[in-house]
Every structure is written in C-alpha cells, then in structure tokens.
Amino acid sequence: VEPHGPVCKLLHLHLIMEVLPTYMDVEHSRAYIDQLYSNDSHKCFQAVSELKFAVIGSVREKGTIIEQGVVVRLLQILRSSELDILLKTEVVTVLNSLAKGLPEHASSLVQAGLLPALWEQIETCAGGSGTSAYTQMILCCLRSVYRQGCAPPPPSWDHKLLTTLIQHGYHPPSNQECVANILAHACKTCEQQQQLVDAGGADLVACMLCSPVSRVQLPALHCLAAMCYKNERVSSILATKSYGGKAVPDLLVGLMARDRPRDMQLAAATSLTFLHRAGALSADDPKIIFKTLQCLVRMCRRDREVWERVEAANTLAYLTEVSTELQRTAAMTDHLIHTMNDYLKDTTSSAGASAPQGICGSPISCRQYDNPSTWPELMLEAALKVYASLGANDEDIRQRVIKTDGLMNTIVTSLSAACPAVQLAAVRCLHSLSRSVHTLRTTFQDHMVWRPLMTVLKTSSSEELVTVASSTLCNLLLEFSPSKEHILDQGAVEFLCGLTRRPHPGLRLNAVWALMNMAFQAEHRVKVSILHHLGTDQIFRLLSDTDVHILMKTLGLLRNLLSTKGHIDQIMQCHGKEIMQAIILILEGEHSAEVKEQALCILANIADGDMAKNAIMSNEDVLKKLMNYMVIPNVKLQIAATFCISNLIWNVEEGAAERQNKLRDMGVYKLLQNLMTTTDTALFDKVKTALQQFH
Amino acid sequence: MKMATSSGRCSVEPPLFGPHTGHDPIKALYPMVNEEETPLPRCWSSKDKYSFIGLTQNNLRVHYKGHGKNHKDAASVRATNPIPAACGLYYYEVKIVSKGRDGYMGIGLSSQGVNMNRLPGWDKNSFGYHGDDGHSFCSSGSGHPYGPTFTTGDVIGCGINLIDNVCFYTKNGHYLGVAFTDLPPQLYPTVGLQTPGEVVDANFGQAPFVFDIGEMMRESQCRVRTTIQNFPVPDTYGQWQTMLHRMVSTYLVHHGYCATAEAFARSTSQDFDEELTSIKNRQKIQKLVLGGRLGEAIETVQQLYPGLLENNHNLLFMLKVRQFIEMVNGTDTEVRGVSRSPSRPPTHESSPSPPCWSNGRTTDPVPGTSSTPPSSSTTSTPVIQQHTSVIQSTKNVISSGQTSASPVTTEELNQRNAQDLRASSPPSATNGTTPVIHLPVPSGSSSSSSSSSSTSSNSSSNMHDSDTEMECMEANSHHLQETNNSLGDTSHSNGFSNGFSKDIDIQDDENEEAMEVENSVGSRKMCGGNPDAIGRMLAFGKEVQHMSQVLRRELGKNDHNKKILQDAFSLLAYNDPWNSPVGWQLDPLQREPVCQSLNSAILESHHLPRRPPLEICVAHTKQLISLMSRSGIGSCAFASVDSLLGSQQ
C-alpha cells in the first residue's frame, strides 16, 4: 500500500516536472539513479527512497524508470543476501508501485524476472512472521503484478511455496487480500486447481469468505471461482467445506444477498454457477435455481454498470447452458428475454465513456472492460450467448426468443462481424434456434441465414467456430429444411468433404453428419457429387476412424446414399467393389453390435437394388456371414440379416427363383424355418415374410 | 494500512426492522406502519366483494359460487384494508387450491369502489395478472403478455414497491419482473375468479412466503440508506461540519456532560455558550432530582437561580408534588433523614441520562433503587466523617498496594488524598476551603445550603485546572468500577464519571450498605415505615395542597396540576403503594420528565434553548417520517431514525 503523505507532495512535484523540458527531466532522474548503483548501502537507500517518491502516483515516471533499466538493479538488490531488510522493503515498495502502472509496465517487470525473485524472497522469510513489513510488501507486489493479468501463472506450483503462501493468507487482512488475489489469478489449469486444494487452499478460501473485510471476501470469491471452474473433484471438495459452522455454498448465498455490494453478489453468483456446472450442486438446489439465477438476472438490469451486465449475462449463459429446468426458469424471470434485447441495441452508452476505474471483475475477464469502445460488442456477445442457452432445449422459449425484436437481423449481421467472439456467439445462438423445425422452415428461410453461415465456415480459421457452425449446418441440411438446396448451391458438398479430412474429430463428425443429412432422400446428382468429392479412399479412412460416432455417421451416410433402387444400382455399378470391401471390413472388424447392424442394413439396401443384388449373391463369403448373423444371439442383428435375405429372394423380381435356389442350397431356408420358433415378434415377422418368398 | 478503513461496513448485518413487536408476523413485516392510523390488510373483506365470491377459513380462502358462463359472471374480493404506504414494500401470496373449470383467475390490486363484478385489471385503477393466459391487465380489457400461465398448485405472489410505485409478481418463488408502473395510492389486494370450482388461499404474511421478500426489503433498506447518506449537503467553508459540531456540543452541555463537552469542544475548536460552572450546577441539580432528593433540589435551585421558581409556579408545584411522591417513596431527604442517621446523605438513585435517547439505556441502575430506608439494625452503623477531594487519583490507591479485592474505605481514601494534596499543592490551596469539600449533607436546611455553596466555590476553583480534573475523574471511575463490580452496579455512564465523582465516592459506599439492607428487607413501607416521617409527609401534603389552592386562585384552573396532585395523593390510599394502580409514580423513571422540565426552565432563564437542537432535530425527523407515512411516501418504511442511528455504530 502506498503511503499517503509523499504521494500528494510528489504529485505537486510531478506537475512542475511536466512543465519543464524533457532534458531537465532526464537530468533530474539521473541524479538519484546513479546513487542507486552505489555500494554504500546508506546512499543506496536514499536513492531508492527518492525513486519511490518519484514513481508513486506517476504513470509516466514509472514508464521512464522501467525504460532506463533500473529494474535489473532493483532485482539485484533484492537478491543480494547481505543487504539490509529495510532497503529491500523499500525496493519492493518501488517495484509494487511500478507494477501498479500500466499493464505493459507490469509485464516488463515479469520479463525482467521479478516473479522468481519475489518467490525466492517469500521462501527466505518463510521462517519469520507473516506480519513483517517485508513479507507484506512482497505479497502486495505479487498481487499487483498478478492483478494486471499479464503474469503467466507458474505451470505447476511448488508445493512448499504454495503452502507458505497459504499460511500467509490467514492473517492479517492485508496479506489475506494479497494472497487471495494472487491465487485467484494464478489458478488456471486443472492441475493448479488440484494443487491448490491439496495445499489447503479450500480451507483458506472458506476462512476468507468469513472475513469481515470486503476487500478480502471479494478476491476470495474470485479465488473460489477459479478453483472450481470445470473441475468436478475440486468443486465437490469445496462444496462440502465449511467455516464457523456454515457450509461454503451457504456462505456464498450469504455473500450474494441483495444488500451486499454488487460486485460481491456477482462474484458469489459466479462461484455458485461454477460449483453447479462442475456437478457439486444440482440444478434444482434452491441455492441455484432461486438464489443464483435470480441474482444473475437481476445483475443484467439496465440500472447496472455495463461490465456488471456483461459479466452477469455471460455467467447466466453458462449457468443455463445445459439444464432445461434452469432455462425455463430463467426465461420467465424478470423479463430476461426482453432485457437481453436491450443488450443488442445498447450501442450508445459507451460512446463518450472514459475507461472505467476500479472494475473488479473476475480474473477470467481481467482487463476485458478497459476499452469502452468494445462494450457494445461485449454486450452483444453476452446477449447472444444467453439466447443460445435459453433456446437450447425448449421449443416455447425458442419461439419467444425468435420473436425478439430484431434478433434475427442481429444474428445475421453478427455472423459476419469482425470480432470472432461475437461471430461465435451468433453461431451458437443460430445453432440453438436451428433445433426448431418450425424455425428452419420459416424464419431461417426468410433471413437466408445459410449465406453468412457458409461464409463463416469457409473463411474462419477458428476450430471452435467451425465446429458450432457445421453443427448448425447439419440442422439446416435436414430434409425438411428449405435451406438445403441453397446450401448445396453454395458448394457445401465440396466444403464438407474437405472438412472430413480435418484432424479435429468434432469437425469430422459434424462434416459426415452433415453429409449424411444431405444424402437423405437426395437427388442422384447430389449423391454422385458426394461420392465424387469424398472419394472411396476417404470413406475407408472414415470407416477406420477411432471415433465410433464418426464411424456410425459414415455408415449412415452410406445407407442414405444407397437408397431407392435406381440410385443403388447406379452407385453400385461405379463403386460396388469398394463398398462391398468396406462392408466386409466392418463386419469382420472388432465393432459393437450397433455398428454391425448399420453395416447389415447397408447390405439390405444393396440387396434391394436390381443389379446390385449380384454384388452380394456373387460373394459367398458375404452370404455365409449373413447366415451367421441370422443365428447369433442378437435379435437386432438377426433382424437386419434376415431383412437382407428377404430382399435378395424377393419374389416378383427378375432372377428371384435362381437366387432362392442358391440360398436354399446353402441352407438358408432351413435356417429360416428354425427361426420361426423365435419369441421376438419383429424377428418373427421378418422371418415369416422371407419364408413366404420361397416357392 | 488503507484496508482497515473499509472493513466491516458491508459485512455487518443491519438490524432488519428494529425490535420484534410481539408475535404478530404480519406486523413484523412492516414495522414502520402505524396500525392505529393505517391498519394492514389481514384477510379478505366479507363486505367488499361480489356475491359470487364465498369466503371460508377466517376469510382467507376464496371460492367461486356463480354460474361462470362468461365474463359477466366474474367476481372479485378486496382485502379488508388498503396497503399502507409505510410498508415500503408490500407483498402477499395466493395459492391456487383449484383452478376449477377454466382457471380464469386474476390476482392483483384495485382501488376502493372499483366494480367487483369484474376480474382485477379490467377497469380503471385495477391491476391484475391472469392465470389462463399469463397476461397482465392494466386498467384495460385487453392484456399484455407478461408471465407464464398458472394453475392448481402454483403459488402466485403480488408485490408492490411503494417507493417506485411499481407492482411485480412471483410464481412459485421465482421473480417474474415488474408488471405495472405508476400505481395510484391506496390500493387493496384483490383476487377475482370466474368459473366454478376455482379456489384460492391468501397469505398476507401470517405464514412464511415462498418468495424471499425479506431479502428484497433489505435491498430497499440499503438503497434508502445510501440515498440518505449520499444526500448532497451544500458545505461551503465547512459550515455543515460546524453545525454538526455545534449540535453535538450543545447536546452534551444541555445534559451536563461537561467533561465530554469540554473534550469535544477542544478537539473541534468551539466555545460554549454557557459557563462551565453553570453546567456543573445544572448537573448537580439534575442529579438530586434523579436521585429523588427533591427537597434539596428545590433548595439548590432557589439558591443558585433565585427567582426562577418564584416566577414559575407551575414548575415549583410540579417539583413539590414530586417531592411528596419521593417522601412516600422514602427517598426524599426530608423523610430519609428521619428514618436513618440524620447526617447520612441519601442513596444515589440513577445516573442522569437523556430521556429522549432512552432506547434501553435509562433503566434502573440497580435492582432495588427505589430504595426503602434501611431497618433499624443498620442505623447503628457508625457515621463516617466523609472528606473527599476533587483532585483524587487512583494511582495513589494502586501505589499503596491496595487491590480491588479489598476495597479501601472512603475514609482512608479521602485522608490519603487529602494528605497527597497537601503535600503537592501550594499552601494557598490547602487552606481548607476550596479543594476539600465537607460532604455529609445534613438534613437541616442551613447546612444543605452551606454544602451547595461550597460546591459552587469548588467548581469555580476547578476551572483553571480542568485537565487534571478530568484525568483524575476518569481514573476514579475506573477504580469505582472495580470496587463495585460485585454489586452489579453498571451505571457508569458518561455523566456518572464526568460530573459526579465527588459524590460518587460516598454514595457508592453508601449504596453498598443500602443495598445489603434492602435485600434483607421483605417489603417496602411508606416513608420507610417511620411514623415521624409519615407525619412530615402528611404535613408536607397539606402544604402542597395549600399551594395548589393558591395557584388556582392566582393563575386559574390547571387540569394538569390537578391531575398530578390527585395522582400523588392517591398513593396514600393504598397499604402498598408500590403495587397499586398509581404505583407507577414511584418508579425512578418518572423523575426524568420532572428533571427535564427543571433543566429546560433553568436553561431558558439563561436564554439558552429548552431542548438541545440535536434532540429537536431527531424529533423533527421522526415527525417528518410519520408525516411521510401519512402522505403516502413509501421510503419512510426504510428510514427509521433509530435503525439508521443504530447502523452507524
């Protein structure tokens, strides 16, 4: 903490200095900077003191000092073992002041190696009491650096160091505040979350939540949120911790009360949200569905600060992303859908706004609100995310969302926004809304959403964005979607086939899925085009994909391609050999029954063709496999195999008698007769139908 | 560290609504509502309803009993009373017991006189949320989409914020948002039903709500408080600050907290309007009155403020009546002197504390303060010649190796102090007159006057040495606290340690004895049971009655005087006046108004305000708040002066 008196004095001095020409300034600085390198510790102390007075309260001075490379010397003093603790304290005070300047200042300190030096010092005085001025100042300095958001957290914490740090977090409040801030900003990965808990961080956080000092409580909440974000194990530990007889979730509800400061309410709501999403609190827990939800919706109101509204909406979107119950409750709470509409329009508020001071958002959104010109974008993004979550599962809510004034236009424009985050939110929203058959047929058609969507797909390099966009495309390609034709016109086949070659499994899955949807009841030319662009090689590759979902969708694609007689014959004529190979590959491979069933279904489809039948009939190996599947103890596979046989021997078709004879010779007829004893009605029906075909 | 300054403020739970009033949960929700003026809605009105409405279960359950063919069969019922503005935030819940045939139910608010053959919301000054379509109806036949529909099993809450004049609803504890704005005043909770089988139950607060309205109230309270605290005051050249300082200072002076007043004045660089001597005199008089020693008080006033009582007959009469009561009580010197050793001063009764602020602080100092005279066994206690010095320090006691466990007698203390003083003071001071006061106050009036004169001379001599005095006094009071802890005497309030130290020494010792005696005495007797004292009391009674007649002749009839005299005389009608219907007069607390009147009269005679501006300001504020309540300004609900002052602690 910077002392008060000298600040005022130096602000005055600083004013004088600004009037003076620059060379004077440099001369002035040099005077004590030279002394800084003195071996006389007294002189050195004098110099550091003067330096302190110069930098406190002056951003410009901080910059100059850093540029002059003074930091190196300061760190040198810090590290030297023989120098006086008072001098070192003074040095850390200067460093702390420098760290509080611009983010660039803090990051150049980090580059100069400030962090290891400070950690080292913390370790050295670990034996001493945590209340010493030196330790306090080091913690303050670490806090200032971390709060700037430019310090990379240690990839993995040193357990001893972490333990020391946590010990300092119990007393006094000034140390608590620093430790909470450091931990909140330096806890990013799953590993760090676990380490923090192992070192006793959960108990510390519970203790700090009960502090009477709000400046401790707030960073403690941020720390808690950072610890439990997407971490089930840590969350379940934290949710069962208690302090003073109150469990952590109850403490959080207390801090979320409506008469608490707003940033505190928001931080507590965020913590509860993360606990819920990590499975530690269920959606129907009153703490979540009543308290947290209402708090977040309340924070979205127009009378709040922009950053609060953005933060609250983002958290709300995350809270309601999965649970239908939460989505329904949120949708009826305090006109939320309407409130979000304000976010879309609110572009004026920040026009002349200056950078806000003292925003204390969570470490996750550190520095995000520094530039007011980005606020409209942030609001837009947050609102689209909320809409995406709200409309994820419930058709009624979806319809209410779609009716929101101007939303569709906003989504369409946002799809081509310059900011990737806004694009992503828009695609997410579109994806949620695309789950409605009604919307696909009406609104999406009216707004020609496929156009910007295809542009996003073709131009974006962000995998996340393309994943969500291709998911949306899957829905737009459903057979009842009028967009389907337009999307084909946009060269979707070629694009999707390209997508199946991407390393990201999500992208491959979506691409095959989209192709499958596209091939469903499609015209022949579309099917040919798919086969042409995909190529049989790629089909083989997809069929040997480690991701079973991709395999299934590929088989589905084949099934859709091989439907209706005409198409089957034509396709088999060109690619029969490869397709049969592929099927045999699957039937012989180590796959689950579902996969094999799909393969048998494809065979059945092939057996439905006129000429294509020969591909099976001429392959005794395949026939034997079919007979084998008819007797294995899996009804679904038996049905699929029987169905295939039944197609092969279908009476009215040319050459049926020939095929019947061949199969009868192989013993199929007998097999069928044996199957008549089955208790499964579906199988019985298939068997009966097949037997009736035999003359 | 900067941190410490910001600590606590937000984590201290403010007391929600002051002390709980009884076990009425509805009243407890709205503590600022004066139900004598504006009763709260507690059930549905059996009169203010359409005939198709039936009420059961203490008029809390509503059912429909019409044909329900179309909207012309709609029927509503209003609550017994309109919602008082002083609720600030009003809320009630309705549980849908059965949606009946079609579930055409409306929940909301309406003014008196709105047609009851309608659902709430359809007419002017009527507002409703309807279950069948979830629409809100704002004085109109056509609704707006508002919330979800509701049906059997749902609990719908209707809230009205009387600060912003908006109405909101909740469904099963979920906040649905504002439905109506710009509401008129004086609305009644209203429900309407339209088809057979519809049944709803109301909860006006008699049972816990599904929705957490308490938290919303705390938010409003927080908001109002912030508004008050952030209210801009034009403070040019620190005038505002100075005014606040003056208010505090005048308050302290008024009640005679002179040491505190001095310290405050010094740290805020102000002057007094009154001389320190004068403050101390008033303090002495107040103490006598509050101690029940009215006779002495009257004499002291006559001595120090000649002409004051002579020109204010009603005040004198009031004092005399009180003196009579104290005689009955056995506390006045006149009767006490008889019952006990004549040279023994009476027991200190209670420390003066400002009556206006007396939220719990002006209680009886110790049990048994309305003391009865001791039994004869204690009258044999040897009389101690009591000397005490104003400049007296506990340091002496401690340095002499005495511990609080074995308290020094006052005698010893005084002697030691006197020696101390003689040793350290210049010879002129040891002359025997100024610093050492001879204080046993004898029963005779002549010595009583000498006592007061010596007190006044003593006070004036203190003027130039006030710093030392204060220090010593503080030390003194600490010492006393230690020695008296066993007695449970916790009344070492400001005034106690500030001004009365010279008497305290004597009296606390005295107290100790008196109380021991009291504990052993079974019941209290009139005038301490002493026949002589009863004689004096009766004689005094006649004197007072005579005075009343004279007064009546000279000043005309005065109902107040008549009543107080009647009440006082009624005490004689009972064997045990303390347990009689007029026994309240004997409560030491009743000395306070008398004390106030006397203090105010003295101040007025010196052209100083009768009441300190601070108290006037508080009284004004309270008055304004009740005026706000009457004028329908809802914020008054969260502007309780007491809770606002309480939260500052």
Image (tube, rainbow, N blue to C red):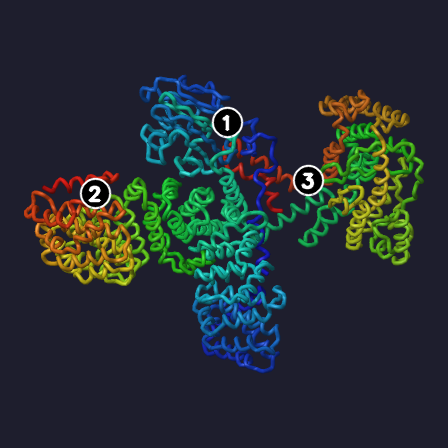
Which is more foreground, mark 1 or mark 3?
1
Tag shown at residue A105: none
Q: Is residue A359 visible?
A: no
Q: Give the amino acid type for the residue marked by disc 3 in the picture.
A: Pro
Label 1 secondary element = loop
Which is more foreground, mark 2 or mark 3?
2
Classify residue A249 as left or right of residue A478: right
Separation (CA) of disc 1 from disc 3: 44 Å
Q: Give the amino acid type for the residue marked by disc 1 in the picture.
A: Pro
- Determine which residue is flagged by label 2: A674
Graded by Cα atoms within 10 Å as few (under 14), some (14 to 19) or many (20 or more), the crowding at tag 3 reads some
- Determine which residue is flagged by label 1: B41
Q: Position of residue A61 (x, y in %)?
A: 48, 71
Q: Residue furthest bottom?
A: A39
- Image quarter of residue B142: top left
Q: Is residue A588 visible?
A: yes
Could you tell me which residue is drawn at 60 percent across and 77 percent down?
A83
Which is more foreground, mark 2 or mark 1?
2
Separation (CA) of disc 2 from disc 1: 81 Å
- Determine which residue is flagged by label 3: B609
Q: Position of residue B561 (x, y in %)?
A: 74, 25
Q: Give the amino acid type for the residue marked by disc 2 in the picture.
A: Asn
Graded by Cα atoms within 10 Å as few (under 14), some (14 to 19) or many (20 or more), the crowding at tag 1 reads many
On-image quarter of the N terminus of chain A: bottom right
Vertical arrangement, residue A437 with respect to residue A65, above or below: above
Separation (CA) of disc 2 from disc 3: 117 Å
On-image quarter of the C terminus of chain A: top left
Label 3 secondary element = loop
Q: Position of residue B308 (x, y in %)?
A: 78, 35
> Are the two marked residues, 2 and 1, in contact with CB atoms closer than 8 angstroms?
no
Classify residue A638 as left or right of residue B343: left
